[in-house]
Amino acid sequence: MWQGSSELEEQNQEEFDFTPSDIDFMLLTHAHIDHSGRIPKLYNEGFRNKIYAHKATCDLCALMLPDSGHIQEMENEWRNRKRKRKGEKEVPPLYTAEEAAKCLEIFEPVQYDEIVEITEDIHVRFNDAGHMLGSSIIELWTKENGKETKTVFTGDLGNNDIPLLDSPTMIDRTDYLVMESTYGSRLHLRNDEKAELFLNIVSETLDNGGTVVIPSFAVGRTQEILYEINKLKEVKDDEEFIRKYQTLMKSNVYVDSPLAISATEVFRENTNLFEPEIKEEILKGDNPLEFPGLKFTQTADESKALNEDPTPSIIISASGMCDVGRIKHHLKHNLWNPKSTILFVGYQAPGTLGYSIVNGAKKVKIFGEEIAVNARIEYIEGYSGHADQEGLMNFIYSFLDKPKHIFLVHGEEKSRRSFKRKNRARCKN
């Protein structure tokens, strides 16, 4: 699914370049909506064969696709009101929540490391990509005219230091590599102290009587932030750190996203995918996704009440790029306030509201109203779920025999071109 500017999102309505019913099967790398979001449209237009995905991806899609359908309905209702006022014909949503729920019947859950026989001549294996729960690097073996060819699809590759998750699996051989390139042109700021930086930003805002608003992707970043907050107590024991930590622990931390709440449950049910150290903690009874002061808001009324409460607090709310969902209401009520902080912890695509704010916009439009950006704006890049240029290069270095060809996808033009120049001399063609 296209995400970003309205021009980009209009492409979601376009016809597929193929007949959906002709597709024999699908391999889904992970549940994020930019990868899975048009599966219901594909299903509505006749695709009925299997979608192979890791079990955790299937669990998350069961939440995220109906949620996406609900958003499609709400956004479409708003657009249709504008069309009616202009005397234009109403149009249906891309798909509904009910239609999204129907497509789940064709999902086929698999586990990491097992060889799955699609047909006699097609085999696949899913490996941990370390990007989000259930994210996969897919190895695909195809046999044609007696010759076997192997292709590896990276999906989205994670950082080596993403909280909760293991590092991406390294693959030793492939003929062809289809690779993401989101951060192909840049390195992440090495931020071994991101937890302490997070605490400083939060405590300063709370001391100032403000609210910290964290636009966060409901699945992945939200759970990682909860984990980091829980782990802060183990970082240092000096007096000032303890004061800041106690300020945080005395404050309410709201997760204001029904989807994030449900996704956190999926994380709890798939703790076997966590890195070994965290699994050990869970066995000892220390759940890394729970701590004092953590509150979940389910209803729209509960969400609205957060903006009517003057008590300094932390609000984690989706969507991460600020384009849809409850986050827009929290931004409307906090962006103008110099006491508040908007803390970004994930990638902001060009054309999104989040991108405008991070890149210094003085005013933004939310629900048709112009809002001054007076709040403190911070971005902790260490929370990115994507490998940077170095991480991507390390994945290529892991191959004992370099691929015959590397196809770069999932990156802006500048990023892909930069990464192509970086590794052009390192593959055979």
Image (cartoon, helix red, strand yellow):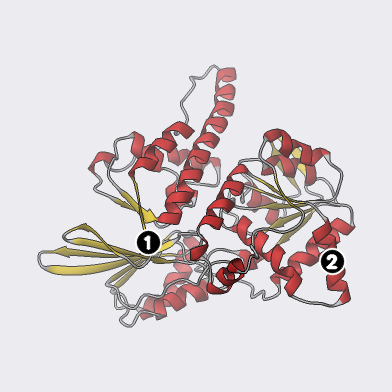
The residue at which mark 1 appears reads as: 111
Q: Quadrant of residue 363?
A: top right
The spot of residue 408 in percent (x, y) is 39, 64
Q: Is 416 located above or below residue 428 in the figure?
A: above
> From the image, which quarter does the C terminus lie in?
bottom left
The residue at which mark 2 appears reads as: 244
Q: Is 91 located above or below residue 200 in the figure?
A: above
Pick out the residue farthest to the top.
87
Label 2 Cα crowd, 10 Å radius (few <14 / some 14-19 / many 20+) = many
Which amino acid type is shown beneath numbered disc 1? Gln
- Which of 105 and 347 lies nearest the eye of the viewer? 105
Q: Earlier in the sequence, mark 1 or mark 2?
A: 1
Local SS, label 1 = loop
Local SS, label 2 = helix
Q: Quadrant of residue 249?
A: bottom right
The spot of residue 291 in percent (x, y) is 72, 59
Which amino acid type is shown beneath numbered disc 2? Lys
Pick out the residue farthest to the bottom.
400
231 relative position to 104: left or right: right
